[in-house]
């Protein structure tokens, strides 16, 4: 076996910028070095851990000078968990970095004029803002000293290590009741010798724990087990008795070799089979109610979701007689938010369960001018479909990170709605798609929205208006 050459420590390197995946950037002899958990303005001693032709990756071994942009992270797991890589960067600089990320992607990758870009919309809450967290059980916990043990753990996966989980004592992303529930589950499992899931050998009982809450204090806990071993029902009973504030306590049996559960049935152990999130209406309109079940997608920052959708409504400038298409509609949240402003709205979504939830939410909100269809957008959105459901005056599209399929883009160019409002969680693929739509559309307003403080992730909205 060829030994990896030990790299020397490079002293007094200045961190200059924020880069991909939340890592900071330094430059050594003209080469870009990506460095996790550093802050622009830090002066550090670096050890290179990976060196490629055009870039390298490094690790901070000592900080010689602390940047004035640096703050003290609140999370006790910062630097190990990897989930909130910007917790040591003050929030104003986080927002500036995200806005620059959007601008760089649109201008460099798409050649897009960003003169219409607005200031990023920051999150009112930067801690305890999430309404959903998913934790993993594992037979292998990760600790700093020693770096790996065979003790069971309940928490988050260590980045790039599929079988190692960090025991989370306290997470600042969700209301503190989430911490109390998780620690209660872990302690009960330890005391009663319940087995944790072994991802390598696919054995054990406890697999995942999902905790959801709503803005008005409804809580859902979903325990995902690989098999029904003795004692698991005692855990469910204990949760029911210890946390009477739970609106919904459910479980799912997942015997698959992966953690996805959207295709699996959930069973209600106590309480209701759902919780209900209420969202303020646009410009004082009647609030909307969304039924959330274990498999239901909903934006994880509820307050910012309302702001995001309000920007979409602003950009859409809907008229009472408009026909609107909402592509990649999910559970219909954007479509239902806009439905009262137009004549007719058509939502299309790949996941059939999400479409069923969208239809249920339309009924719950007494909205009768919205229809939802399930299928692959590249195959569903055809000339015949548009002829049957009406030519769209406005299209809202919110695709996954991969962006829109070329067939969808071509169909939008052919249908020529007067306006397209493009929502994206990936400015790089958004830039690619907007550049293709520029054949017939002029870019107008651009609105970045921070849904995920302390992370590198960003949502962005682009307004596209038909030329001529």
Image (spheres, grey):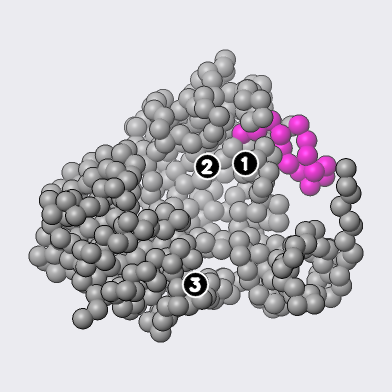
Number of marks in the image? 3
**19 to the left or right of 96:** right
What's the CA distance linking mark 2 and mark 1?
8 Å
Q: Is residue 460 above or below residue 169?
A: below
**303 to the left or right of 291:** right
Residue 12 drawn at (x, y percent): 84, 75
Closer mark to the observer between disc 2 and disc 3: 3
Residue 1 drawn at (x, y percent): 88, 43
Q: Residue furthest top?
A: 230
What's the CA distance linking mark 2 and mark 3?
34 Å
Q: Assign the C terminus to one quadrant of the image.
A: bottom left
What's the CA distance linking mark 3 and mark 1?
37 Å
Residue carrying label 2: 134
- In the image, is residue 440 part of the stretch drawn in magenta? no
Write the residue at 38% across / 75% down. Answer: 446
Mark 3 Cα-neighbour bin, 10 Å: few <14, some 14–19, many ≥20: some
Mark on residue 155? 1
Residue carrying label 3: 109
Write the residue at 36% across / 30% down. Answer: 271
Q: Which residues are magenta?
A: 137-150
Write the residue at 63% across / 37% down. Answer: 154
Question: Looking at the magenta stretch, what is its main secondary structure?
Answer: loop
User: What secondary structure is marked by label 3?
Assistant: helix
């Amino acid at each position: 076996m060829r030994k990896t050459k030990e790299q020397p420590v490079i002293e007094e390197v200045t961190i200059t910028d924020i880069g991909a995946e939340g890592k900071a950037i330094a430059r050594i002899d003209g080469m870009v070095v990506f460095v996790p958990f550093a802050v622009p303005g830090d002066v550090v001693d670096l050890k290179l851990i990976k060196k490629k032709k055009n870039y390298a990756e490094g690790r901070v071994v000592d900080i010689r000078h602390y940047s004035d942009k640096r703050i003290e992270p609140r999370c006790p797991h910062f630097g190990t968990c990897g989930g909130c890589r910007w917790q040591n960067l003050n929030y104003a600089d986080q927002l500036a970095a995200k806005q620059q990320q959007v601008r760089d992607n649109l201008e460099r990758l798409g050649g897009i004029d960003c003169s219409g870009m607005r200031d990023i919309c920051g999150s009112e809450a930067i801690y305890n803002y999430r309404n959903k967290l998913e934790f993993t059980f594992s037979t292998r916990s990760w600790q700093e000293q020693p770096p790996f043990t065979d003790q069971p753990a309940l928490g988050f996966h260590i980045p790039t290590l599929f079988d190692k989980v960090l025991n989370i004592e306290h997470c600042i992303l969700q209301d503190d009741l989430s911490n109390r529930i998780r620690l209660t589950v872990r302690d009960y499992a330890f005391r009663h010798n319940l087995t944790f899931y072994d991802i390598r050998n696919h054995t054990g009982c406890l697999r995942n724990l999902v905790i959801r809450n709503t803005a008005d204090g409804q809580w859902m806990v979903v325990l995902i087990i690989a098999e029904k071993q003795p004692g698991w029902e005692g855990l469910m009973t204990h949760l029911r008795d210890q946390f009477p504030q739970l609106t919904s306590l459910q479980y799912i049996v997942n015997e698959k070799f992966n953690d996805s559960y959207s295709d699996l049935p959930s069973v209600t152990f106590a309480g209701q089979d759902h919780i209900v999130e209420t969202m303020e209406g646009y410009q004082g309109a009647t609030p909307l109610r969304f039924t959330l079940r274990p498999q239901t997608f909903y934006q994880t920052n509820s307050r910012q979701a309302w702001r995001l959708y309000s920007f979409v409504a602003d950009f859409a400038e809907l008229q009472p007689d408009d026909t609107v298409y909402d592509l990649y509609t999910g559970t219909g949240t954007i479509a239902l938010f806009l439905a009262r402003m137009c004549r007719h709205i058509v939502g299309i979504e790949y996941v059939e369960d999400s479409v069923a939830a969208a239809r249920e939410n339309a009924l719950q909100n007494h909205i009768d001018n919205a229809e939802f269809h399930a299928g692959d957008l590249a195959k569903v959105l055809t000339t015949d479909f548009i002829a049957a459901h009406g030519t769209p005056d406005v299209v809202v599209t919110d695709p996954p990170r991969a962006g829109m399929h070329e067939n969808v883009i071509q169909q939008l160019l052919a249908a020529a709605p007067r306006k397209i409002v493009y929502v994206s969680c990936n400015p790089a693929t958004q830039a690619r798609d907007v550049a293709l739509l520029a054949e017939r559309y002029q870019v107008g307003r651009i609105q970045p929205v921070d849904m995920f403080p302390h992370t590198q992730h960003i949502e962005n909205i682009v307004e596209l208006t038909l030329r001529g």
